[in-house]
Amino acid sequence: MINVAAPADARTGKRPPGIRPPATTRPGAPRPRARRLRPLWFCAPFLALFAAMYVAPIVYAAVSSLFTVHRSGLGLTAPSKVFDPLGNYARALHDGAFTGALGRVALFGVVQVPLMLCLALALALLIDAKSARGKGFFRLAGFLPYAIPGVSAALVWSFMYSSQSSPINRLLAPLGVSVPFFDGHLVLWSVANIVTWSWVGYNMIIIYSALQAIPAEVLEAARMDGASALRVAWSIKVPAIRGALVLTAVFSIIGSAQLFNEPTVLRPVSGGAISSSFTPLMSAQSAVAAGNYPYAAAQSVVLAVLVGVVSFVFLKLTGRGGKA
Amino acid sequence: MSAPAWRTSPARSPRGTGPVSRTVTTALLGLSAVYFLFPLWWLLVSATKPFGEQFSGSGLWFGGFGLFGNIARLTSQDGGIFWRWMANSVLYCGVGALLGTAFSALAGYALAKFDFPGRGAVFGVVLAAVLVPKVLFTLPLYLMFSGVHLINNPLAVLLPSVVSPFGVYLSRVFAAQTIPDEVLEAGRIDGAGEFRIFRAIGVRMMLPALVTIFLFQFVEVWNNYLLPAMVLGDDRLQPVTVGLVGWNASHVAVPPPLVVIGSLVSVVPLVIAFLALQRFWRAGLTAGAVK
Amino acid sequence: MKRFIARFAGVAGALALSVAAAGCSGSPAGTASPSGKASITFWGWAPGYADAVKAFDKSHPDIHVTYQAVQPGAKGGYQKMLNAVQAGNAPCLAQLGYETLPSFAAQGALENVAKYASADEGDYQKAAWRSVTLGGNVYGAPVDTGPMALFYNKKVFDSLHLKAPTTWAEYRSDARRIHASDPHRYISSPYMDYDYAGLAWQAGAGWFTTKGDAWRVTMDSAANRKVADYWQGLADDGLISSAPMYDQAWYTGLGDGDIATVVGAVWQAGVIKGGAKSGAGQWAVAPLPQWKKGGTQVGNAGGSATAVLKGCADPKAAWTFAHWLSTDRTAFGGLVEKASLYPAATSLLDLKQLGPDPYFGGQNIYKVFAAAAPHVNADWTWGPLMTKTVADLDDGLGKAWSGKGTINAALRTAQDKTLAEMKKQGLRVAP
């Protein structure tokens, strides 16, 4: 089982982001062999499907990225594939559109992820606060956007942004304000808004669940001490849910890197502000459309490795000390 | 984290629940609710307008009522295929999420509660898999499914959707936190088999986490677009997201207002699932939190 | 443990049942069953194809065609077809735009059916037949063509005492008049990818040519610059709306008179009719404005074929259906009604469905297109990497129309990127 999973690990060359099992769960005495094999039975259904549905496609993509597409003459016959392990990678690194896209999502991640998580944390703390009323309603309101499929959410927001009939701009009109959502500089943040809208609630729920798991006595004791609600939130709650924050941050980083649906839906109405290679995955997708799957695979591998490195470094930096 | 015990405070009126803080909290939450609900409000208002007026007016307030007429039109378009899509979505998501939750629970429980060689490696690989862009999987999966003649077969959508690394992670963490080893040991001493122990003790204690995994997985499958669009050729097998995007892309064949109405209707089952399960899982969480 | 496995087997069984109940059919396309009845799968998206297939199945007991609707090509349908070819389970037949056909051929995704098809060549218009043949190979049956004309909102034009423009110079002055009458009114929306190509086509400003076994890319030619400069001028003067074509804002504009013309192909009639219902009775069609007074140059935009995809097990039966779809009077009559397709087959040009339409004020718009069709410049070649070329072109055009670049720059960039990709893939490029 473990061997099956190994190639992916070796390929991306990254060590597993180590969220170590807590020592308290370690069972005591050694058991007979039959018993020791039992865990594998428990994992078997998951691992078998995991190997087939995750590892195999990754290996496939990684292998195909080592070939380049080659044609000749007018190219009106089927292309051939030539083994050229570094060809696509060299090309990707010199492809201004692709590196530009990488830079764009990096900027996106650096701004959007902390912003969204702060918002999610603030909302979770507010709902968790003793003084909140209508908790159920607000929790549901925040969570609802998550239930809207990404493509539909982007469609609805494209109506919100429409240069002709934006309801937002109509509301702002009396103030003499009109937001140019598709301005070249603003468009990335228009996309960021959709992503934030869709995912704040999701992150809020994870954080909120972690807040719920804080022992009531601890909070009660702090309150008895006369600590203010803000102080309890900052000094007790936030440190206690550090693990959940790290988790949501990692998932958000991964999500940003995979930005695809929202800009793709907005592109036709963006007046050129969103190009066909706006994000790395869009760039890869347009390579697929041009009949160059190996190049698309190489771009995806580069992206996956970069995301892996960033997540790993992030976990290393935050992992020291109080891991839940 | 333990609080110094020497300081006593008036327990009758703990700070943080005064009228001012209540107002501020509610105002901030209200503001967030406006942000979250604004686009959905637009969707709701548009879908209730008489057919064809979806894009006229400010879109922020109701104008005439045509919801039932709209739904009738939705039903009659292409011989009622919309409901077929909805049924497909519910089937794919329900089955996928159920199996996904079961497999995740088994694996997560094993990773948390058994010591076996390579346990860390398995868990690491599972987490690493979360990092790989999903879009990358579509074409290889497509080719693999073609190889085993699963194209145009719902299994091609179901099989990938029962794999949930995040679910494994969540159930592992939850199992480690909430299931005491002593309880399991007691079961073993009584001579119960491991699977029986898992079913009788593990599942019960992990239930809140399992509901959460089920919900998240349900939504993830529901949102999945690229893969079903690729592997299902027959439009009677497609889930509703793929169907709606198809309608949206066909300028002439399907009137655009139907897409708006269809979008609203397609969201309803998810909202119901959330509403129904929210109470359940909230109770579970609170119970688990006291531990 | 046994019980555990048994239980899972039970779940799997139930799953398999529910899957079967969902009516799945995993049979590969295009197999001839033992009974001798050929079975063909056909992917397309044009409204009306489903009904045509039903009619075919009724009248042809020896061939069974299954129609499956896919996304319009550029929105994902083409990608799905290419993947299916690569995986070896493609349908026998697919709706394929003429502009994409060479790209498909270049990926080895098409089957040569010259053996069966050549005898029927005479049934089709020359230019259409040329669109499905490459180097002596025939890849499918032409279905419709896209001769262009000017759709204009007659009510708006009448209210300003304007007549339909006959030259592009008149078109420009009309644009000024219309915008001056109301700042919300524009002569047109921006043209992208293949709609823009139609404008270049009319002016004889080709994008690709072949010389021996080498490609030449001419998107940056003098003729192309002339067309680009003209439209750039309109955009710079603020006479072009910001509503993208096929967007809801465009339909709204067409309906309420804020967008006064569409320079487009015949099938646009169906798009306008279907999307801008409130414009009923206001629209009319006039011949394409000319670069020289009294000229008769016409461009083409779109048009598609029923192409035979690689791996088709029964290309003969496939051709039988494809040819029938393009030439059957009843079936095509339905396509005219539902999608305003203009037949590529010569014998269908007198279909009664090609008649007056109340949406266009009772005008017989097809007469305009029929007059235009013979003047479509037959000397136009599509490149081998069109998806990439138009994606790059649209990146630039989108900016140019919104005032952040020029159309010329967009064409130049698209040409450079196309050349670079061609060289990278080893295609021969003429110096």
Image: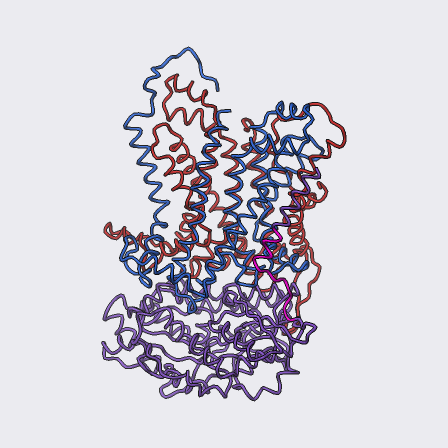
- Relative to B200, C409 lies left or right: left
Q: Position of residue A92 (x, y in %)?
A: 59, 55
| Front-most of residues A156 and C175 | A156
Which residue does the image show at 56% across and 33% down from the upper left? B206
Q: Quadrant of the N terminus of chain C?
A: top right
Letter of the chain shown blue in the rendering:
B
Residue C398 placement: quadrant: bottom left
Q: Colour of chain A?
A: red
Query: Please, is residue A104 above or below residue C399 in the view?
Result: above
Q: Colour of chain C?
A: purple
Q: Position of residue B281 (x, y in %)?
A: 47, 36
The colour scheme is: by chain
Q: Position of residue A315 (x, y in %)?
A: 56, 35
Q: Which residues are magenta?
A: C15-30
Query: Please, is residue A108 above or below residue A25 in the view?
Result: below
Q: Is residue C46 magenta?
A: no
Which residue does the image show at 52% across and 86% down from the upper left? C125
| Front-most of residues A65 and B113 | B113
Q: Quadrant of the C terminus of chain C?
A: bottom right
